[in-house]
Amino acid sequence: MANITKSAVENLLKDFIDPNLGVDLVSAKAVRKIEADDSRITVKIVLGYPASSIRTEMAEAIRSKISDGTGVVDVVVDLGSEIVSHAVQKNLKPMPGVKNIIAVASGKGGVGKSTTAVNLALALSAEGARVGILDADIYGPSQPTMLGLAGKPEVDGQSILPKVAYGVQSMSIGYLVDEETPMIWRGPMVTGALQQLLNDTRWDKLDYLIIDLPPGTGDIQLTLAQQIPVSGAVIVTTPQDIALLDAQRGLKMFEKVSVPVLGIIENMSVHICSNCGHEEHIFGSGGASKMSEKYGVDLLGSLPLDIRIREQADGGHPTVVADPQGRSAQIYREIARKLAGRLALTTKDYSAKFPTISIVNN
């Protein structure tokens, strides 16, 4: 047997492409330690995203790759996750208690953005992350209904305590006003309310805060782009041409304000008849894929037009928790891992490592 070296093992890991990152483990700087000799190889790998549901399977795939390539039977793979803060817009710093803010946006309404946002939050939580969701749709809050929550949140001093459902922290204007009360507010009041909901909530050590944006590119989106530290954004669309046109405007908006777009999610991509199983592309097909290629942005995944997704969200038990083993829930988790993986490849935030300098007049 040839002498087994660390570099030989590292070369094998360079050929292992992480499906959630789209790059190899070495390029992703996920390989933290390699110990190798002719009888035993130990590798420590730390992913920058949550992946509890695939950790065992992925570790075994890495172990097999190394064992087959070296001939060493005794291969130990220590696979874990470490989620850190990533860079935000210039002149802004990550919020205390929140490592990363991810905006979920759409150019137009009716594409299932809020349902997608709540299921992504639940999927990230199911994968092992600490997650919160902020309902930024002041005029039409929907997250309380989808999470099965009601009533006013508790207040502790100057802070509002987030309400919790299925392990996910949440905040919405819907908790603070009556369900039938219309929000007849102009732009400055709306943006002020958003900032209060975000900054006055005592988020508890979140890895990710999902912000469910209202549709369009108006006051809320502008405030988010200029004053809220966002690590990345996700665009939700349907294959329909008019939805794609609006989604492209949203994508360009984030590009202009230097917020990385982590990917596109195509919702309602295909309808599968519950009676006969016939598949039909009601809203067209291939649109999000073309948009992905045109702008060089990843297509994170496609979700079916399924009545159960709507029913489960309306009933306060979104798909990821209502049917965790179902195909739709698995797709949400795949998308969640990919978006977190794409974020893990972006620039990290190092502001916390630098001392704060203050000048005091004596």
Image: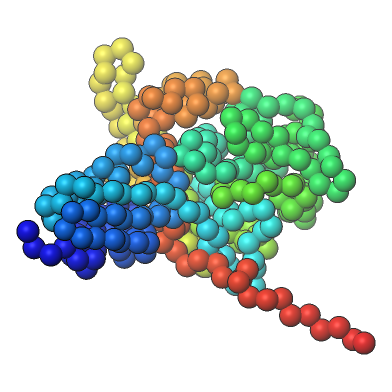
In the image, farthest residue toward the left: 1
Please give the name of the residue rendered at 57% of the width and 20% of the height, measured from the top-left corner: 315
- Quadrant for the N terminus in the image: bottom left
Using the image as rendered, state which of residue 194 and residue 245 is in the foreground: 194
Give the image location of residue 12, x and y in percent: 19, 59
Residue furthest out toward the top: 275
How many tags in the picture? 0
- Is residue 291 among what the camera can see? no
- How far from the left and from the top, in percent, is residue 324? 43, 26
* 230, above or below 279, in the image: below
Looking at the picture, how far across and down is residue 40, in whole percent? 22, 53
Please, which residue is most extreme toward the bottom here?
Answer: 362
Image check: 243 left or right of 71? Answer: right
Q: Which image quadrant for residue 334?
A: top left
- Give the residue displayed 24% in from the left and 66% down from the top: 6
Compared with residue 226, is residue 101 higher up or lower down, i.e. above or below? above
Above/below status of 240 relative to 20: above
User: Viewed as shown, does residue 117 lie left or right of 226?
Assistant: left
Q: Is residue 127 visible?
A: yes
Q: Residue at x 56, y 49 (%)?
A: 208
Which of the pair 276/227 is nearer the observer? 227
Task: Please name whichever residue, 114 or 22, is drawn nearer the observer in this view of the structure.
Answer: 22
Location of the C terminus by quadrant is: bottom right
Q: Is residue 282 left or right of residue 191?
A: left
User: Colour scheme of this structure image?
Assistant: rainbow
Residue positioned 42% across, 40% down in the render = 52
